[in-house]
């Protein structure tokens, strides 16, 4: 089969509906005249795909949805699917798709690309499981040195991953498009939208300061904490809220579609991007939520980690703290009571957003792919 234009198949293990980074990357490359397909996972609660995207989307269904059996099954299913596809290049997103993608790229003699959204072997769920960590790291060391293009979300991770896997990593930050004006919040799961709220968007997983943020709500006044997303701690966090009798102050929104997430973020009073230093992946992270808050002009209470320190030293757009209950409460109260500080952070966030937005990263991304394929 002859391809009319360069085709790239991107592979993830997550639900395609909520992966904003991959939606941006695939859309930008499709607009730049690449044929793009994004392959992901079909979960029992997956919503219908958004058919308005300009790239193909494919979901694979597994019998197992977590643990070692899931990763094994998914890579087998992904391998079998990719083996039948005609394409120019395969892109593995993180190490959990790399075995299938790397093996197919070797067998079919196609270009291998690697996109690291995080330092996968240093996430909290993996750092204390040495055998699991060794397996993922070994897969990386087998395939990544032969990748024709590698990139990740921040400068520090690019240096670290480059040394480990003996390949150059470029940086494509996980930033949103510039926001044009402020949208009104629409109906969100029956929640009262007139009350002021602190907002967290992302996975409800360990080491993200969620337990501490919930307990901090005992010490703050007339404001709610809204949590958008689900994860490994979904049930545990809901139980904690009930135990602490905070049902009126902590609201779980569940999964929110990206187009609705934008309006909720824009109307938040404060954004949260709290992390515990459990693993180098979090320590050197640059989370998409941080830039979403920035674009919305929402002051952020953020982890006091190197990449955020570097940005804050230049733009002063966040409150950087260590992750503990009292500091979270103090920071929330200060932002609510100190209007001068609040307005300063808000205005500085909007100024910083001119330098951290997808229109800039998109140019870099397309440039990397043009160079790779000699376009």
Image (cartoon, rainbow, N blue to C red):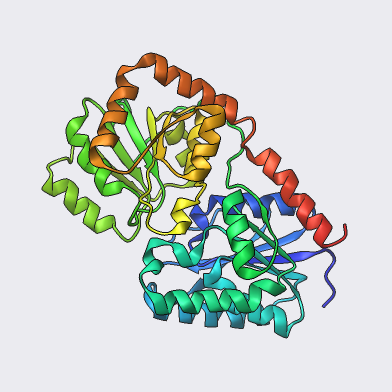
Picture coordinates of residue 216, whole percent (x, y): 22, 38
The part of the image, by quadrant, that contains residue 215 is top left
Q: Residue at x 44, y 18 (%)?
A: 343
Q: Residue at x 22, y 36 (%)?
A: 217
Whether residue 191 appears in this view of the structure is: no
Image quadrant where one finds the N terminus: bottom right
Q: Is residue 210 above or below residue 347?
A: below
Query: In the image, residue 185 lies at what x, y percent?
Result: 42, 31
**85 and 310: which one is in front?**
310
Q: Is residue 205 left or right of residue 31?
A: left
347 in relation to 126, above or below = above
Q: Is residue 158 visible?
A: yes
Residue shown at the point (55%, 36%) measured from the top left = 311
Q: Position of residue 11 (x, y in %)?
A: 60, 67
| Front in this rendered view, residue 135 or 370 | 135
Residue 186 in the image, given as x and y percentages of width and height: 41, 33
Horizontal arrangement in the rendering, residue 312 relative to residue 356 (left or right): left
Above or below — where is 146 with respect to 271?
below
Quadrant showing the C terminus: bottom right
Q: Residue furthest front?
A: 163
Q: Residue furthest top?
A: 340
Give the total of numbered labels. 0
Q: Which residue, as the protein is rendered here, is positioned at the far right?
A: 375
| Quadrant assignment, res 325 | top left
């Amino acid at each position: 089969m002859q391809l009319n234009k360069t085709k790239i198949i991107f592979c993830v293990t997550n639900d395609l509906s909520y992966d904003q980074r991959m939606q941006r990357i695939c859309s930008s490359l499709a607009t730049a005249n690449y044929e793009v397909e994004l392959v992901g996972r079909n979960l029992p609660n997956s919503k219908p795909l958004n058919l308005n995207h300009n790239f193909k989307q494919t979901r694979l269904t597994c019998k197992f949805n977590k643990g070692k059996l899931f990763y094994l099954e998914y890579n087998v299913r992904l391998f079998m699917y990719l083996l039948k596809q005609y394409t120019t290049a395969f892109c593995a997103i993180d190490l959990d798709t790399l075995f299938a993608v790397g093996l197919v790229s070797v067998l079919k003699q196609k270009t291998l690309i690697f996109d690291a959204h995080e330092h996968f072997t240093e996430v909290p769920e993996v750092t204390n499981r040495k055998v699991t960590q060794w397996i993922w790291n070994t897969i990386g060391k087998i395939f990544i040195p032969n990748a024709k293009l590698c990139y990740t979300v921040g400068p520090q991770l690019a240096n670290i991953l480059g040394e480990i896997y003996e390949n150059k990593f470029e940086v494509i930050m996980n930033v949103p498009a510039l926001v044009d004006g402020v949208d009104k919040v629409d109906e969100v799961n029956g929640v009262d939208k007139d009350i002021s709220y602190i907002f967290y968007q992302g996975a409800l997983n360990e080491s993200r300061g969620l337990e501490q943020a919930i307990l901090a709500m005992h010490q703050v006044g007339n404001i709610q904490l809204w949590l958008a997303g689900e994860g490994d701690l979904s049930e545990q966090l809901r139980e904690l809220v009930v135990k602490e009798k905070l049902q009126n102050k902590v609201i779980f929104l569940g999964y929110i579609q990206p187009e609705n997430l934008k309006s909720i973020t824009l109307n938040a009073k404060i954004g949260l991007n709290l992390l515990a230093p459990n693993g180098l992946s979090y320590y050197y992270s640059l989370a998409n939520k941080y830039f979403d808050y920035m674009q919305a002009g929402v002051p952020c209470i953020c982890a006091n980690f190197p990449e955020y320190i570097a940005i804050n030293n230049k733009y002063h757009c966040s409150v950087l703290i260590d992750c503990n209950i009292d500091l979270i409460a103090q920071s929330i109260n200060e932002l609510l009571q100190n209007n001068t500080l609040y307005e300063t952070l808000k205005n500085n966030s909007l100024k910083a957003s001119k330098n951290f937005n997808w229109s800039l990263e998109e140019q870099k991304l397309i440039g990397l792919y043009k160079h790779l394929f000699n376009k």
